[in-house]
Image (spheres, helix red, strand yellow):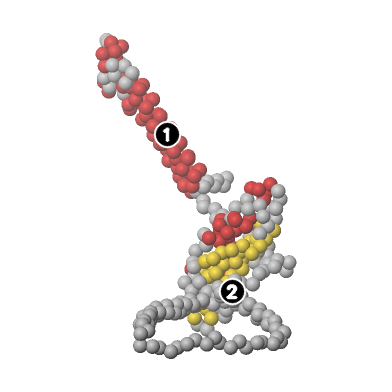
Amino acid sequence: MDLAFNGSALLGIVAAVVVLLLALIFVLRNAFGSKSPEQLAEIHEGDDSPLLKRAKYPEADVFRWSNTFWLGGLAVSFLLAVLAFSWTTVEEKVAIPEGAMDIDDDIMIEPPRTAEPPPPPPPPPPPVIEEVPDEEILEEEPPFVDQEVEAETAIEPPAPVVEKAPPPPPPPPPPPKKEVKEIFKVVEDMPRFKSSECESKGSKDEVKACAQQKMLEFIYKNIKYPPIARENGVEGTVVIRFVVDETGKVKEPEILRDIGAGCGAEAMRVVNMMPEWRPGQQRGRKVPVYFNLPVKFKLE
């Protein structure tokens, strides 16, 4: 008979055996200590049984239980040995949907965002020049002012000239624009899920396939089907886009396509749990790269 127990079941059985042994010790202790030495002496007063030669009080003789303890110990040891040999660790199988990395043609993927500033507003329209009709302009002669000065005429000094304040200094130049790092969509060496087991593979294609398999196992091992989606039979593909920067960290995750019922939020939760990746490289230099990840939700 093939018996298989996981760790929690074996721990429960061992705990039950320990509790049983403690209960047996408690019962025997109460049985031996239920009567005082005076009561035992009164019971066996005048008794010439040969059992008294070995023990003063037969009821308190622990050796009479030796065979029982010996057989019980053998049974417990045999049971623990069977459990130890039957303790097996079963590797959990992760159910990965077929075509997990395929993105359907009907899924529209919007272009990547750019951090460039918006274009300036258009200039205002030029002013409209209205034509003024020709009119005859009459020139008026200036009035005659007598500027003759006599000796008795009092001359007032001219008013002091008030100097105007200097104009304010021009505003400071705008700060230099912050350099925006280019985020690539396709590079020579695309980023991949980091796994020590995959790095020891032979060819580059084998390493890439192994890393993709490990990534899918991580996603579908940690993902939980939302109860609302399960109750309403919601199925489909959620597309998450994120950036793998130069250090391999997963940043700026966003939902490109959501099927509702909490599936998009669940996919985002799993993506935020991801460990560091192996960053992408372009011409031998590590660069940030966009990565589109489809997450399929399918009821079994």
Residue at (50% x, 43% y) in the render = 9
Task: Determine the image quadrant of residue 135.
Answer: bottom right
Q: On the image, numbered disc 1 is attached to which residue?
A: 19
Give percent across and percent down for residue 69.
39, 32
Judging depth in this view, the residue of 118 and 104 nearest the camera is: 118
Looking at the rendered image, the disc whose residue lies closer to the viewer, 2 or 1, is 2
Q: Gap in Å between the C-alphas at discs 2 and 1?
A: 74 Å
Residue at (62% x, 78% y) in the render = 123
Q: Which element type, helix, strand or loop, lies under badge 1?
A: helix
Disc 1 residue crowd, few under 14, some 14–19, many 20+, Cα 10 Å: few
Residues at circles 2 and 1 in contact by the CB criterion of under 8 Å: no
Judging depth in this view, the residue of 45 and 296 nearest the camera is: 296
Locate the N terminus by quadrant. top right
Give percent across and percent down for residue 164.
40, 79
Tell me the number on the disc at residue 118.
Answer: 2
Mark earlier in primary sequence (2, 1): 1
Tell me the number on the disc at residue 203.
Answer: none
- Determine if residue 55 is in view: yes
**Kind of residue indicated by mark 2:** Pro
Residue at (37% x, 27% y) in the render = 26
288 above or below 46? below
Q: Which element type, helix, strand or loop, lies under badge 2?
A: loop
Judging depth in this view, the residue of 246 and 202 nearest the camera is: 246
Task: Determine the image quadrant of residue 215.
Answer: bottom right
Give percent across and percent down for residue 231.
68, 47
138 above or below 59? below
**Kind of residue indicated by mark 1:** Val
